[in-house]
Amino acid sequence: MGFALRVALAAALVSACGSTLEDEPESSADAQAADQTPASTPPADASVPKPMVRPDTGPPSLPPHPQSSPVACDFQNADPGPALIRRLTRREYNNTIRALLGDVSAPANGFTPDEEFMGFNNQAASLGMTPLHAEQYMQASERLSETAVTRLESLLPCQPAVVGEAACLRAFVISFGRRAFRRPLLNEEVDGLMTLYDAALVMDPPRFERAFRLVIQALLQSPNFLFRIEVGEVFDVINVEDGRHEDKDRLRLTDYEMASRLSYLLWQSMPDSDLFDAADRGELTTAEQVKAQARRLLADDRARHTLLDFFDQWLRIGEVYTLSRDASAYPDFNEGLRPLFAAESHAFIEDLLWGPVRNLTRLFDADYTFMNETIARYFGVPGVVGSEMRKVPLDPTQRAGILTHTSIMAVTAKPNRTSPVNRGVYVRDHILCTPLPPPPPDLPIVPPSPDPTRSTRQQFEEHSANPACAGCHALIDPIGFGFENLDADGRWRTTENGHVVDASGEMTATLDADGPFVGAAALSRQLANSEQVHRCAVTQYFRFAQGRGETRADLCSLDQLYLAYEDGGRDLVSMVEQLTSTNLFRFRRRPLEGALEEANAEAADSPENGAQP
Amino acid sequence: MISRRTLLRGAGGLALAMPLLQILPGRANAAPSFPKRFIVVFNPNGTLKERWSPQGTESNFTLPQITAPLERHKSRCVFFDGVDNQVADVGPGGPHNRGMATVLTGEIILEGPFADGDGQRAGWAGGISVDQFIAKELNAQTRFKSLELGVRAIENEPRARISYLGPDQPLPPENNPVNVWQRLFSPIDQDPEILRKTVVQRRSVIDLVLGDFQRLNRKLATEDRQKLSNHLDSVRDLERRLEISADGPMLCTRPGRPADLDVASEDNFERVARQQIDLMVLALACDLTRVASLEFSSAVNALRFTFMGLRDQDGHSLSHAGDQSTDLQDQWALMLTWYNEQVAYLLDSLAAVPEGEGTLLDNTLVLCCNELSRGNSHAHDSIPFILAGGAGGALRGGRHLVFAGESHNNLLLSTCHLMGVEAERFGNPDFNTRPLPI
């Protein structure tokens, strides 16, 4: 789905709801920035039509089915977009501390949980910094340095008694500082940190240990540690007309910046020694070099955890740990089920990413799932023994793929009932990437309170029959009703409150998944074959990987990613590997002149000044 | 006046280890004059004005259902009708986001990345909030410039933030009372010798960190520098607090740790609220800060009052109930009444702390606010503002003031004046014509 179609679709959806939409969801700042870099803006952008704004509330008019992208993209010149400064997320902080200090205390678990935005917790726009954060970082650095000093010998590259205290501390500052800042320290930075050795003279002895702790505290509170900062460097390109010349639109990430970009993308952690070594040798410069490292990182368990985290956030699976459930409505629910709900989905996703059949079509239409004995007993599936998760066939008339998993059914339910509205909205938001606007402001309507004499469907149909609601709910509820055979704990039901469950539904206002269906399995198979659905999956990964929402300037890169995804047979791991050789990943948009001159002067200074151990 | 021991046990609140007098050694009645304190209390999704507005004359009135819990503090309260959040009617985003971003800032909401119901994209607030402005102007030499507390105010969006350091700089509240307790009553602060050493060490570390900002700023483009400036300001604030700590240990000894509760649970909403109020009062009584805010949940919340047996609907849904749906509005009114019960508990607690001839309540100004006046119309006119407390003698309570469409920026300006903070204007000047005569 290209940009024009997406805009038209959004406008169609909104017009059906009787509201208006003036532009696609991107910030105006981004749009302006894109306009200021004409050379890197997809050429067809100028012809992108203004979205239709229709005040009437008739049925949505749909754009034609996209056979190919309407925007002719030159991938070589795709705009990489800005390199937003990103504060480490709590998860990244914990992982980084573990790698840096061997400390598994996960100190960030106590930090302010203020990160989630657009469904992901790693978005630059929401990773703010306040006095409370600074205080938490200070206290964490103090605690971590206390623990580190108990393992002094394993962290020092030398023996103070042999080489002398000051010399050994300097060696530690240089080697540890390089890992903490994820680049070699400048000489002035080393000298600055060494003043702590002088300061320690008047503090409680022993002096060396005191200085060692202060060095760790200073490094862990530095913006160089807490933020991922990608300044980039100028580089030359060669083309037919001009020969070799400096790229005017883009900066290339330095080798050290690239090492961090790779490690945080794939491991949510700092670079390992191989990446540091490659950066030292200047071997993270070409697309092939970067991709080779990506391949290596993807083969590690840390990449599995990172990609699972992506699915947890994209599909909201992680919410099974926090959802509320009323015991009165769901007496069988107990706390022990939460990890099992997640475990089923995790085992299923792991198999799709790393197992023999790596095709995300199966994410939606698989006729199998994963269970261990406890889960199987919960669902009444015989013959599964032991705590190990293993593949179990599904009844294809009842279930297909992840959307029929207990995890998703649970997180889209209310505490005391299923919610066809939540489930319909979930499919539109997370699976189709066409979120609907919230209800208009002045509707004096409340969702139906649970009524034990009527089915959920009856109650919601009555609610949505109100003319003020019908326009939008016609796009939501018929999807959600399809799930009604699955209760809020994901179990199959054929009757509810004495009524036979009616799970017939209809998809409308999609690009290529429209049509009636009966039941969640049929709906899932309909979605599994939709280009819109798979474009959406790619877009969700883009947000997770880039730490920001997509903008007009990213359309070409999104097309490039989608092609890689389809070419690889909808193998997400393969697409992630391909991503690392794109403009999007290797470069950043060049900031406006002025700021750049200073950046260049500094960049020219730093390599020679880098402190060597 | 309730007993101090009752205050610290709290009616359902945390059972602190020792009564207030014990953690305030040599403090009670000793100081010749006591500073002014400022508190904001926020609850979301509007109210039902017909069950909120006092009935009678300006100074002789009765309180209907929703404000009835404040009956025992009526003589310390000023209730407002006809003060509108007019600046919330302009700018991008839906009415909840606009209300939230303006209620304490008086500035037009910024455009930003948050998709909203009107098809536009809401951003964060466009200016400093009145609590932060007052904290800045008072410039009190306390360990915390201000304290932002939340009760299940969890979402990281404009609809869940009231307090701002400046344009585009939301301050997230701390939702976990145990974390608040750890911040406020660090064991380090209890021992003058440890404190002195810690201050020396922290200073040397922070000096180095500040140097890192200088080097980074030379390398960065302007737009990126902005991103780091909040961090720099935060580190400078740490430095400022070190200077204050260096003057000596705090007035209070460390109270007991509040009970650990699952702060995300609806069932614990009331218990967490009481813990937060208790900690806020302690922080003010111990002069750890002079400005604090308490944010109950967030606009468009999915919060049910299960602890009151209201299990069917969440607060935001109930706020949408049509005027014919009496049963649903009755449930909504129960929730709205509960919020004022917490305000009354806060006022009880402040009144229980002696200060000179009076109490902490006499020296405190409390501003109660909401991002809407009514949920089912999303109106911003006649916001249910309440001012309470003595503001050091500046506020005369026991009144119901009715205005004819006054911009709430005027009220925010008057709030500054009541706190002794001189200002010509507050918020967007187009919406600030005068201080409200209070």
Image (cartoon, coloured by chain):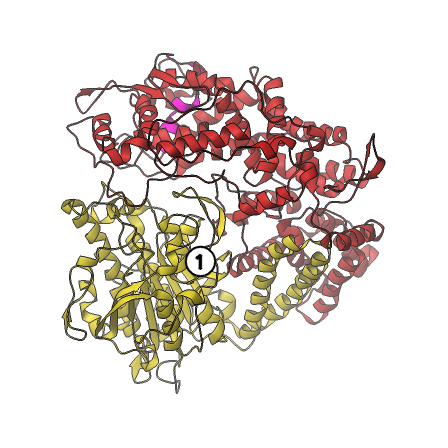
- Between B186 and A325, the one nearer to me in the picture: A325
Question: Is B58 situated above or below B150?
Answer: below
Residue in view at x 40 percent, y 28 percent: A427
Residue in view at x 62 percent, y 18 percent: A567
Task: Decide if residue B234 is on the left or right side of residue A495.
Answer: right
The tint chain A carries is red
Task: Decide if residue A189 is on the left or right side of residue A81.
Answer: right
- Between B305 and B4, the one nearer to me in the picture: B305
Residue in view at x 17 percent, y 58 percent: B51
Q: Which amino acid type corresponds to the residue marked 1 in the rendered image?
A: Ile
- Between A158 and A259, the one nearer to me in the picture: A259
Question: Is B66 situated above or below B387?
Answer: above
- Between A362 and A382, the one nearer to me in the picture: A362
Residue in view at x 63 percent, y 50 percent: A227
Membership of A407 in magenta stretch: yes
Residue ID for mark 1: B108
Q: Is residue A299 visible?
A: no
Numbered range of the magenta stretch: A388-411
